[in-house]
Amino acid sequence: MPSPKVRLRFAKRGDLRLVSHHDLMRCLERMARRAELPLAQSQGFNPRPKIAFTLALALGIEGHHEVVEMELAEPMEPPEVLRRLAAVSPAGLDWLDAEDPGPGRPAQAGSVCYSLPIPADRRDGARSALADFQAREGWPYTRHRPDRTVEIDLRPFLLEANLEPDGTLRFRLKMSPSGSARPEELIEALGLRDLLGRGAVLARTDVELAP
């Protein structure tokens, strides 16, 4: 007998990368109703479906292997949940896998992987900047917020990175309970932030779950 929880992997590509996390949550609730999934509801004055995304995806970033967990009011086989959602999903939202996570707390991200295409005329500079970043013991960065500035060190969060022969920059960032470096911050440290404003699409290629 499956448990009432199901963990799903999905991709959010194309124009859907311009849909906010909040709007994606509302979209998923509507899709679940159309798919006739018996979602469990939270308690309290304003009950909500029990849907938990492991990690929000910032506006403009594609997600290729995202994670969301749903709690059902009655058990259902994960492949059936996957099939029903796939039948009612808009273009650009692809359901990839479903599993029974068993009882326990929602999944937490241990690390996240990203990719960014680098134009041919910027690759030598990007390769040099990446080598410099990786050789440093620390990389101070000032994060500006509306009410204050926060000083962080980007270097400990970068677990691995490389510029592939086809010009794709791939990197993996560590997640911690207190937060992480943002992918845009690393891209800025490498002198590549302007590419995001020129149409280059940043993609989160995987969300690796903590043990």
Image (cartoon, rainbow, N blue to C red):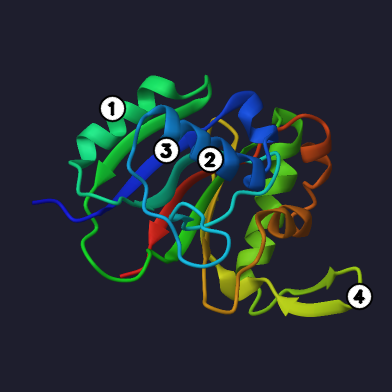
Q: Residue at x 32, y 42 (%)?
A: 38
Q: CA distance from mark 1 to mark 2?
A: 20 Å
Camera-near label (4 vs 1) is 1
Under mark 1, the amino acid is Arg
Q: Nearer the viewer, residue 73 or 2?
A: 73
Q: Residue beneath label 3, please?
A: 10
Under mark 4, the amino acid is Asp
Disc 2 on helix, strand or loop?
A: strand
Q: Are marks 2 and 3 in contact (CB under 8 Å)?
A: yes
Q: CA distance from mark 4 to mark 2?
A: 30 Å
Disc 4 on helix, strand or loop?
A: loop
Precedes in sequence: disc 2 or disc 3: 3
Q: Residues within 10 Å of mark 4 (few under 14, many from 20)?
A: few
Q: CA distance from mark 3 to mark 4?
A: 35 Å
Q: CA distance from mark 3 to mark 1?
A: 12 Å
- The numbered disc on residue 83 is 1
Q: Are marks 4 and 1 in contact (CB under 8 Å)?
A: no
Q: Nearer the viewer, residue 34 or 167?
A: 34
Please provide percent x and percent y for residue 148: 90, 78
- The numbered disc on residue 63 is 2
Q: Quadrant of the C terminus?
A: bottom left
Camera-near label (2 vs 3) is 3
Precedes in sequence: disc 4 or disc 2: 2
Q: Residue at x 58, y 75 (%)?
A: 156
Q: Residue beneath label 4, please?
A: 147
What is the number of callouts on the image?
4
